[in-house]
């Protein structure tokens, strides 16, 4: 499978980025940094925008037209999405669970729920709309409510389903961006320090700072779709033969040394033994992955979860 600059599976890196954003974990910054180090800028942008669409809408539509050109712009985009997701979750959960019972609304029936909800949303009466949503649980099935509110992300968990429906209701209300600090263009110092601390580690084993979180290993990822009886750790221990399937950064390095790809096997073919030795010496300065500790290897590879 395609490997990132520091030999994580690319699909697992993007899933880790999205998972950390969804859960509000600061490590999202590291996974974005890893995608940028891998020269996978389009993949990084698509991952951020898709996460925002699923969990951050409707606060800042400009996110969909963002085209970051430098590190600060990437950090600012990520922070905007973090704020949007946090604000959406905070509003939905807070109003839904703690304050909707304080709001009066007309009794919900099969006939009036859709029109009452639409009216409340058009007047931006969020708490009324959420109270209507809760009351509708007694008169409508979840699928009927999903159809009315336009929710596309159902769940078997009743609390999760209600939260997703609440976020869908929020999207029906006219909104404005969350309040911004006067220094909105200033990146928080702790974030700058974190990114700066990673730069000297580029290209070394120490740059593999974090393990892919288990929560990110969904069935759309390499290990999330692999049976427990199998492991992909062999791909890490000898990564060079398959690097033409790696990230854009690795493909560019192979082209620089004149390496080609075998048409039948897809393996990397170096023009000479010295070119191969030079490639290892340059890009694996602190041992090849086969000689790393098992702890280091398990940060990115290991047994499947199925």
Image (cartoon, rainbow, N blue to C red):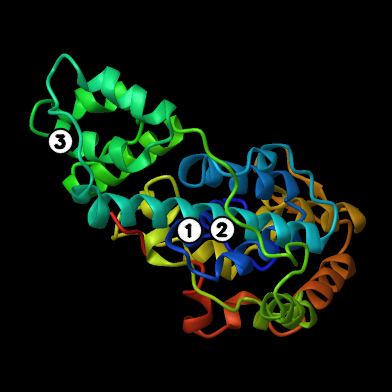
Tell me which corner region of the image, top left, top right, bottom left or bottom right, holds residue 70.
bottom right
Q: Name the residue under label 2.
A: 83
Q: Is residue 115 left or right of residue 22?
A: left
Q: Do the residues labelled 1 and 2 touch (CB within 8 Å)?
A: yes
Toward the top, the furthest residue is: 111
Percent x, y for residue 119?
35, 23
Q: Mark 1 points at which residue?
A: 86
Residue 233: assigned label: none
Q: Can residue 217 be seen in this view?
A: no
- Could you say whether the residue bearing mark 3 is in a helix, strand or loop? helix
- Could you say whether the residue bearing mark 1 is in a helix, strand or loop? helix
Percent x, y for residue 145?
23, 27
| Mark 3 vs mark 1, CA separation in Å | 26 Å
Q: How many labels does the image show?
A: 3
Tell me which corner region of the image, top left, top right, bottom left or bottom right, holds residue 179.
bottom right
Residue at left 67%, top 68%? 6
Toward the left, the furthest residue is: 138
Q: Is residue 224 above or below residue 54?
A: below
Q: Earlier in the sequence, mark 3 or mark 1?
A: 1
Q: Is residue 288 visible?
A: yes
Nearer the observer: mark 3 or 2; the answer is 3
Q: Which of marks 3 and 2 is nearer the N terminus?
A: 2
Q: In this view, does 141 lie to the left or right of 260?
A: left
Query: Along the line of sight, which residue is nearer the eye, 150 or 104?
Result: 104
Crowd band around label 1 with a 10 angstrom C-alpha radius: few (<14), some (14–19), many (20+): some
Q: In this view, does 131 lie to the left or right of 210?
A: left
Residue at left 58%, top 83%? 292
| Mark 1 vs mark 2, CA separation in Å | 5 Å
Q: Mark 3 points at which residue?
A: 135
Percent x, y for residue 219?
37, 47
Percent x, y for residue 32?
65, 61
Crowd band around label 2 with a 10 angstrom C-alpha radius: few (<14), some (14–19), many (20+): some
């Amino acid at each position: 499978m395609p490997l990132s600059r520091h030999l994580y599976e690319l699909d697992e890196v993007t899933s880790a980025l999205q998972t950390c954003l969804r859960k509000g974990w600061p490590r999202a910054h590291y996974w974005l940094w890893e995608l940028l180090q891998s020269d996978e800028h389009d993949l990084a942008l698509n991952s951020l925008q898709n996460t925002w669409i699923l969990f951050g809408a409707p606060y800042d539509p400009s996110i969909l037209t963002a085209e970051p050109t430098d590190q600060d712009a990437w950090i600012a985009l990520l922070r905007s999405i973090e704020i949007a997701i946090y604000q959406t979750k905070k509003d939905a959960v807070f109003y839904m669970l703690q304050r909707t019972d304080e709001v009066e609304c007309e009794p919900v029936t099969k006939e009036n729920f859709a029109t009452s909800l639409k009216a409340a949303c058009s007047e931006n009466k969020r708490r009324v709309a959420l109270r209507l949503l809760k009351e509708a649980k007694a008169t409508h099935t979840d699928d009927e409510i999903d159809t009315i509110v336009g929710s596309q992300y159902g769940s078997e968990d009743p609390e999760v389903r209600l939260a997703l429906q609440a976020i869908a209701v929020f999207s029906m209300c006219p909104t404005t961006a969350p309040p911004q600090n006067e220094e909105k263009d200033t990146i928080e110092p702790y974030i700058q320090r974190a990114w700066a601390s990673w730069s000297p580690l580029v290209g070394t084993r120490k740059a593999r700072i974090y393990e892919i979180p288990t929560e990110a290993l969904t069935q759309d990822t390499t290990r999330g779709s692999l049976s427990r009886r199998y492991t992909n750790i062999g791909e890490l221990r000898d990564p060079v033969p398959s690097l033409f399937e790696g990230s854009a950064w690795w493909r560019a390095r192979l082209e620089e040394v004149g390496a080609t790809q075998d048409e039948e096997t897809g393996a990397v073919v170096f023009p000479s033994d010295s070119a191969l030795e030079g490639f290892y010496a340059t890009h694996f300065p602190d041992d090849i992955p086969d000689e790393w500790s098992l702890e280091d290897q398990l940060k990115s590879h290991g047994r499947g979860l199925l």
